[in-house]
Amino acid sequence: MRHHTPVRTPRLLAAAAALAAGTIAFAGCAAPASPATGEGGSGTAAASDLAPVTFALDWAPNTNHIGLYVAEAEGYFADAGLDVEILPYGSTPASQLVSAGEADFGIGGQSGVQMARTAGLDVTSVYRITQTDTGRLVVLGDREDLQRPKDLDGLVFGGFGAPLFGALASSTIQGDGGTGDFEEVVLDTGAYEALSQGRIDFTLSVATWENLQMDIDGHPYRAWRYQDFGVPEQQSTGIISSDAYLSEHPAEAQAFVRAVAQGYEFAAQHPEQAADILLAANPDTLGTAEELVRRSAELMAQDGYFVAQDREIGAVDPAAWDAFGAFLFAGGFLTDAEGKPVTEEPDWSTYYTDDLR
């Protein structure tokens, strides 16, 4: 795998939450390998024989991406005949890079795909990394006056510049019996910094990363899951490609998705070894975050994020796509390629495929 290490601090934006365990039949994973050697797969293909594939991250490397690094270290990509390059994270969203053909695959969650494809981008979901929504509505843990979402009425929300984030907060509050009315400001600093300074009262965060970091730092959040208050479920993190790439490179696309699935299967079965691999591959960005990476890898392996009880790993949940799609449509968050609100809800089954796994 050819990859470049971003220089940004590894922090997931809460946008990942919106755009966002059990028994499962795992396709045979290789035995745990040493991240230093990267052994495990046979890796018999010569480098010159490997088909190049590019992948766009949505942020600095973190546990959402762990299956990619495992697939490289364990030789799954090489065994599949692929040379995968992880592109350095930049200011251009992965969905735009994939749609423009500047990346073959990238990170893209359910709601992000639903909005981007409706707006005319050539993106389709090919693999679902998290089977449930990782997003949370959060306040500082020591705010004794804020015990339930409805307590947030009339307070200050730290948003991220997109209406959907405020809608997730408002809908969660309304689901708890509140009015969902509050003042919104756009954050220009870290969420915890803004909360601790009293500039905002609540915001959104990612349960599998930011919430853990705050707990490690001794400043835990009090968090509420949107879905516990009526917001529809969504598969908040996934992998996307374009219809153009899938039609032009069907063999490579299937090989990539199957190798990635092996990587996430390994991470679900062996979170400690998978964390070793992620840390070894990204010493510059994750060298001071070992505890966070290990706790996050364990959480995502055990709490139903990588796997779900009722479907195979990485599979689509059509009911979630229909329900959250209806939420987006009813809320007026969907626009067409000309920026005009859509007047007919799309057929969400055309926004994803399960044929490559």
Image: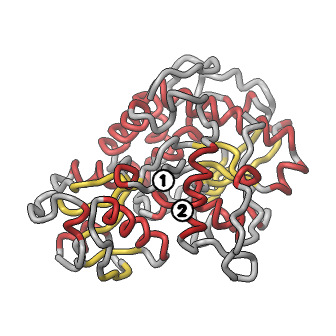
Location of the N terminus (image quadrant): top right
- Please tell me whether residue 263 is drawn above or below residue 107 in the rendered image: above
**Residue 106's x, y, as percent?**
65, 54
- Disc 2 secondary structure class: helix
Q: Amino acid at mark 2?
A: Phe
Q: Which residue is rendered at x = 78% and y = 56% of the image?
A: 242
Q: Which mark is residue 64?
A: none
- Disc 1 secondary structure class: loop
Q: Which residue is rendered at x = 48% and y = 59% of the image?
A: 16
For disc 2, the marked residue is 327
> Around disc 1, counting alpha carbons within 10 Å, would you say few (fewer than 14), some (14 to 19), or many (20 or more)?
some
- Please tell me whether residue 72 is drawn above or below residue 198 in the rendered image: above
Who is closer to the viewer here, 254 or 226?
226
Gap between marks 2 and 1, in whole Å? 7 Å
Residue 123 placement: quadrant: bottom right
Seen as rendered, the residue at the extreme right is 248
- Is label 2 in contact with label 1 (beta carbons under 8 Å)? yes
For disc 1, the marked residue is 232
**Residue 3's x, y, as percent?**
62, 51
Question: What coloring was used for the rendering?
Answer: secondary structure
Q: Which residue is rendered at x = 55% and y = 28% of the image?
A: 310
Q: How many marks?
A: 2
Q: Amino acid at mark 1?
A: Pro
Who is closer to the viewer here, 50 or 126?
126
